Amino acid sequence: MLEVGDDGTAVVVAQIKALMDAQDLPFGTELCLERADSGFGKASFLSPLYAIDVVRYETTMQNQRPVIIRLHRWNDLMLRSKNGHNMKQKRFDVVRVEVLDCTTQKPVFDRPMFLAVSGKRKTEIETKEAHLQYRERYEVESYYRFAKQNLLLDKLQTPDHDHLQQWLRIVQIVSWMLFTAKRECEILCPKWQKYLPQNQKAIANTQQPLTIAQTRKAIKTLFRTFDKTPFLPLKCKKGKGRVKGQKFTRRTRFAVLKKIKKTSRKFKMQQNE
């Protein structure tokens, strides 16, 4: 049973194990990849879930810049055991990702990116596939940024369980709407932002799904197409009013009592003395 004060890594490990052990889900029988960030590259996460190859391929960045991806892979590396998590027989691979310019062959970024490939079936995962799978995390990072800035993902603190449940429900609804509407909305941006490469790509290719930021700006045009009837104020009948000749008893009027401030009352008492 998980508690509020449990370690975040332990909670993630327990959730992954629950998914793998579920009989009605296919995760336990298929090869699954967990795309986690650098915060999970430690023994407390890798232990419970337990030569150099060079790969080059060309691709295009979001700003339409052609680049070369160069991958180096070190196999069967070991991590020091720590805090009771044994890593002696749990080797892992490390992939170094370098982005090179197609023309100059020089690195585009100052530092390369390192990825860890762990698990008993790590040899079944190709080097290029490991990098492509991790690249899909980029959309997750943009969602985290949106949720922190707009949904209080890292700021909400409440001792009330009902308040937490209501907030989680709102987050789920917003996330579902952004995910669903990214293929239904058309990009909407001011004239001075149409020159940006990312916006130009979305304008030219209408079949490409929008990003979270683009969907958030364009979703209001989708809301305008909804039927407004459920959201309009309810109509109510006016009261009949007083019948001719009907009289009501007068209300009881009470005397107005003014509260005297303590300071002024004390001052008057001193004057009387």
Image (spheres, helix red, strand yellow):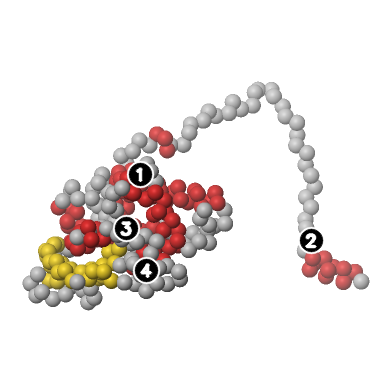
Mark 4 Cα-neighbour bin, 10 Å: few <14, some 14–19, many ≥20: some
| First-in-chain label (2 vs 3) | 3
Residue sitting farthest toward the left: 103
Question: Circle 4 — which element?
Answer: loop
Residue matched to label 1: 25
| Label pair 1/4, CB-CB below 8 angstroms | no
Few, some or many residues within 10 Å of mark 3 (<14, 14–19, 20+): few
In the rendered structure, which disc, 1 or 3, sits on the residue that comes first in sequence? 1
> How many angstroms separate mark 1 from mark 3 (CA)?
16 Å
Report the Cα–Cα distance between label 2 and label 4: 77 Å
Which residue bears the numbered disc 3?
A: 34
Tally the marks: 4
> What distance separates the C-alpha of mark 3 from that of mark 4?
19 Å
Residue sitting at x 40%, y 54%: 17
| Residue positioned 42% across, 38% down in the render | 231
Identity of the residue drawn at 39% across and 46% down: 22
User: Which mark is nearer the camera, 2 or 3?
Assistant: 3
Which of labels 1 and 4 is toward the front? 4
Q: Which residue type carries mark 4?
A: Met
Q: Which mark is residue 260?
A: 2
Q: Which residue is located at x 30 percent, y 59 percent?
A: 120
Count neighbours of disc 1 (C-alpha within 10 A) and say few if under 14, some if 14 to 19, many if 20 or more. few
